[in-house]
Amino acid sequence: MDDAARNMTHDELVDIDRLRAVLPVLDVLGPASLFYLGRDGFLPVHEGAGVEQLPIGDGGLSALLARAGEEEAGESGLEDISSPAFCLRRGDEVVAAAGYQSWPRSVAHLSVLVAPHCRGRRLARAVASAAVAHALDARLLPQWRARLYPSQCVAVALGFRELGAQLSVRLGDGPVDQGR
């Protein structure tokens, strides 16, 4: 890392164009807000009575991921969960799911996905609430990473507090092209 990259301010670090000017950036993920929740701050959703627990790899969960498309499924992180999946169905179709991946230091990294045709109905809150309760019962610290405003709203509705930000970059091997 050169001196220009080392001396960047916080705002410059999340300015993708500025990063590309000083580093050989190939890919960028973020910026995203990081939210955390302790047991005392949890605001559970009680109308999630229809939430069921499914094993990882369940066909209904796989169908939800396929319907959402590769980009949204990848962004959700649902394929990487290590917890059970907490799901809601409409008929036989899984329309919302949440779970978490156990990370180091007892962090439960939350993943949530709602079928595109079922968004805006508070389904994310119901399934996420079940996943958060499961993580808290396992004495884990729930973490919510959100780029999009609707996802941030769900986190706040459950009692999460924004405590950080994340920006991931994949760097190339070559020097920065100063002619860009």
Image (cartoon, rainbow, N blue to C red):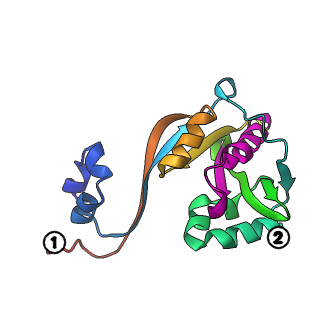
For mark 1, what is the residue?
Answer: 178
**Residue located at (67% from left, 23% from top):** 40
Identify residue for label 2: 59
Q: How far apart are the alpha carbons under marks 2 and 1?
A: 49 Å
Disc 2 on helix, strand or loop? Answer: helix
Q: Which residue sits furthest left?
A: 179
Q: Is residue 170 magenta?
A: no
- Quadrant of residue 130 within the rendered picture: top right
Can you tell which quarter of the image residue 180 is in?
bottom left
Q: Earlier in the sequence, mark 2 or mark 1?
A: 2
- x, y percentage for residue 94? 78, 62
x and y, in percent, of residue 126 in the image:
73, 43
In the image, is 29 to the left or to the right of 154? left
**Main secondary structure of the magenta stretch:** helix
Locate the N terminus by quadrant.
bottom left
Amino acid type, callout 2: Gly
Q: Which residues are magenta?
A: 108-137
Which residue sits furthest top?
A: 40
Say what amino acid the circle numbered 1 marks: Gln
